[in-house]
Image (spheres, helix red, strand yellow):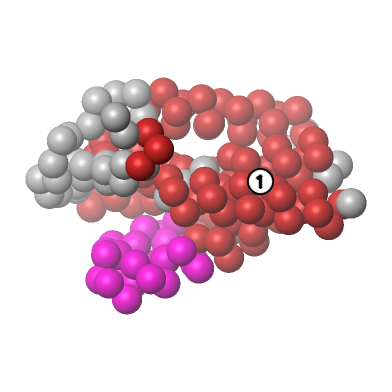
Amino acid sequence: MEILLAIACGIGIGAVLGYVGAGGSMLAVPAFIYIFGLTPVAATTASLIVVFVGAASGALPKLRRNEILVKEALVIWAIGLTTNLTGAYFLPQIPEKAVLTGFALVLVTAGLSMLIPGPTQSTERKVSPFALVLISLVIGALTGLFGIGGGFLAIPILILFYNVAPAKLPELPCLSS
């Protein structure tokens, strides 16, 4: 039964990742904690692995179509990796309630930031190198501490700081009038 539940959770998380491009960890961490009984530390660690595999599999087709800003992604990843590893190192020393509260605050903050109207079309905006480093370090720390960050934090940052228009979701035939 647990295997079927894990498969159902995986399908749900994968569907959200594939359709929205973010949110795998916001679903995986609570599922690991409340459905599978993992501790917050184990759940955030497992989430990093699960979401990485899901995101990588979704990124491969986009990479082939040149839809990924590889240089920018690698810079952000490399800078964020330092605080990511630091956050993951200190995570076991942080009380579980503080981890869960921090996780919830990050989710609420990121969700509220998505309510801010974004640009209707992309007009590339340059961000100072200092701001890029700071943003990368924050994303890395949050990823290391809470097992989240990738798309869930990157999408609002791309919209708010880089003026990248959100992708239009395809219209579903069953929802069109």
Q: Nearer the viewer, residue 30 or 143?
A: 30
Residue drawn at (87%, 52%), measured in percent from left and top? 2
Residue at (14% x, 45% y) in the render: 122
Is residue 148 left or right of 158 when viewed as pictured? right
Q: Residue at x 44, y 31 (%)?
A: 110
Question: What range of the chain is rendered magenta?
Answer: 56-81
Quarter of the C terminus within the rendering: top left
| 96 with respect to 71 (left or right) | right
Residue that numbered label 1 is attached to? 28
Q: x%, y% of residue 154?
A: 39, 46
Is 47 drawn above or below residue 153 in the view shown? below
Q: Is residue 1 left or right of residue 58?
A: right
Q: Can residue 68 be found in the magenta stretch?
A: yes
Q: Residue furthest bottom?
A: 64
Residue 2 inside the magenta-drawn segment: no
Which residue does the image show at 58% across and 65% down from the upper left?
53
Quarter residue 169 falls in:
top left
